[in-house]
Structures are given as C-alpha cells and as structure tokens.
Image (cartoon, rainbow, N blue to C red):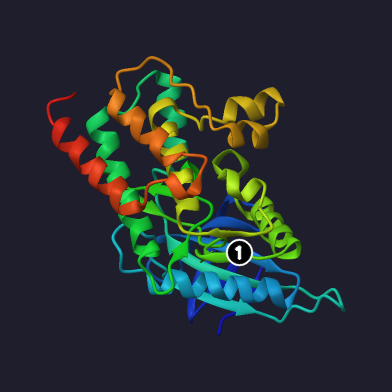
Amino acid sequence: MGCICFKQSLEVEGVKYKVIRHLADGGFSSVDLVENTRTGKKFAIKRITCHSIEDQNLAKHEIEINKKYSNHPNIISLVGAVLNGSADIVHNVTSEVHLVFPFFERGSLHDELERRKLTGNPLTQASLLSMFHSICQAIRELHQAEPPLAHRDIKPHNVLLDKNLSPVLMDFGSCCQARVSIRNMREAQYLQDTAAERSSMCYRPPELFQVNSHCDIDERTDIWSLGCLLYAMMYYHSPYDPIYERGDSVALAVQTGKINFPSSAFSEDLQQLVTEMTNVDLEFRIKIDTVIEKIELLMNNSSNIV
C-alpha cells in the first residue's frame, strides 16, 4: 500500500515520487508529471477521485485491465497502482486511486495532430497507415479477450506517441464487456447514460446515442470510434468536431452517418475504409480483423507514397 505523504510528494507500491507539474484533467481524473525521488526518472501519475464504492470498483477494474495488457507493445504499461482510503457516499468521504505510467514526452496523437495542423504538415499515408495499424493491434487485443472487451473511448487524446511516433493506447476507464444484450427501457437508458458520461461525443457511435430497448451491442462500437480516429489522422479532427463547434446536434449528425471528405492526398481506398468503419448499422459494420486486413493491403499498396 502507499499513501500521500504531503502535497508535493506521494508513494505508490513503496516507491516515492515528487510532483513536478500538472499535465492534464479528464472527466473523472487528473494527471501529474512526477519524478522517482531515487532514480530521477519521470513518470505520469493518474489520480482518480472516488466518491462511492461504485467509483472505487470502476477504478479497480481499470487497474486490472492495465495490468492484464501491460505487456502489449501498443498498450500503455502500468508501473504501479494504489488505492488510498475508502469512499463512502453517505458520509461524503472520498478515496483516491493512483496509477503510475511511463511518461511520453511527445504527448498524445491529439497533440501531434494539432502541431501538424498549425504547420500544414499532414501525416503521409504511409506513416498514417503504420500508426493506425499499431492502434488496431491494441484494439484487437481487447476484442479477442474472453469475454471480449470494448475500449469505448477511442480518440486521439487516448493514444500516446513515443519519439518514433509509435502509438500506445491508454485510458481504460471506460473499458467494459463488449457484448451487451438490452431487453428493456431501463437497461437501454443505463447504457445510454453511461456512454454519455464516458464516451466522447464526437467519437461515440450511433447505437450509444440512442440505445434501443431491444438490441445487442458488441465490440463494433469501437470500430466506429476507430473510423472517426482514422478520419482525424487524415484531416486533424473527427468528422463531427465541426458540427459540435457550430453548436449543431452531433447526435443527429452521427445517426445520419453522412461524412464529408475534403480533397487531400489520401487515397479513395482509405476514405472508403472510413466509410465502412462508420456504417450506421452495427450489423453491417466491419470487425477489427477486417480493418487490419484492409490496412495491411493499403500499406502494401502505399509503399511508394511519400
């Protein structure tokens, strides 16, 4: 076990860290840059504040997922984790979970796309395909679990990049059992509310915006989000970000499924893949193995594109 020793220092699994600076805030957590007080090596610590036992269980589940997949080259490794305190919603007592991860100085895919947008320097198709292929490998690892898991919040902010632009999938706070059978309005409303809380709007699939009272949801929810992420890698943003920024209904736009492709150097085959991944009908949306097969074919065909 570990404890917060004082404001600018904390301990996780017997290792002491000094807080250097704040990095980011999420919907349910914050991230600080820290330094191992013995070795001087830098890490990122994610702090999750838990207001209830349910929050605590979700945080523990996130730790379990991170531990299970830490050895995958395209999934972030968990250095250490600890739960401090015990949440009690009745007495307004919170607990805090700390997860220690490697620090990626280059930041996220979102950061990279923002830099490239400012300089007018898009990814080449060959580089994009290589990066996206690695991201898909991470997603396939989740989809092949028993039972299958869905990430449920795939977006450029949740992909970190090392100095060689190799991507690493992170943030498993929304990760859950992929296959869900909905059989009444109560179950539908619960899934819809959970998605509204934990799945980013501009990458959320249509079946999670308006959950039918009798339906079956599976891991292809992630394929829609991956399609939006692929689009963002091509054009710097999700196809639905401009709609959100205008103040129009993202939910309505997502459920119509119409995506506009600006003119670019990217191939029509790549645009077609985005279209197949964002099919509004879950039953006709392709699966991760098919996505990877198509990406590998495009990689072979794009070897001479610069």
Give the quadrant of the C terminus: top left
- Name the quadrant containing residue 9: bottom right
Name which residue lies at 68% across and 22% down: 246
Name which residue lies at 79% across and 79% down: 88
Name which residue lies at 30% across and 64% down: 72
- Circle 1 packing at 10 Å, graded few (<14), some (14-19), many (20+), is many
Q: Is residue 137 visible?
A: yes
Vertical side of 1 occupied by 17: above or below: above
Vertical side of 211 occupied by 224: above or below: above
Spot the residue most to the right: 91
For the residue pair 81 and 175, the one nearer the viewer reads as 175
Reading the image, the residue beneath label 1 is 47
Vertical side of 120 occupied by 257: above or below: below
Secondary structure under the numbered disc 1 in the rendered image: strand
Residue 103 pos. (x, y %): 42, 55
Disc 1 residue type? Arg
Residue 64 pos. (x, y %): 48, 75
In the shown orientation, is residue 181 left or right of residue 101?
right
Residue 115 pos. (x, y %): 43, 28
For the residue pair 152 and 184, the one nearer the viewer reads as 184
Q: How many marks?
A: 1
Give the quadrant of the N terminus: bottom right
For the residue pair 154 and 195, the one nearer the viewer reads as 195
- Name the quadrant containing residue 251: top right
In the shown orientation, is residue 241 left or right of residue 128?
right
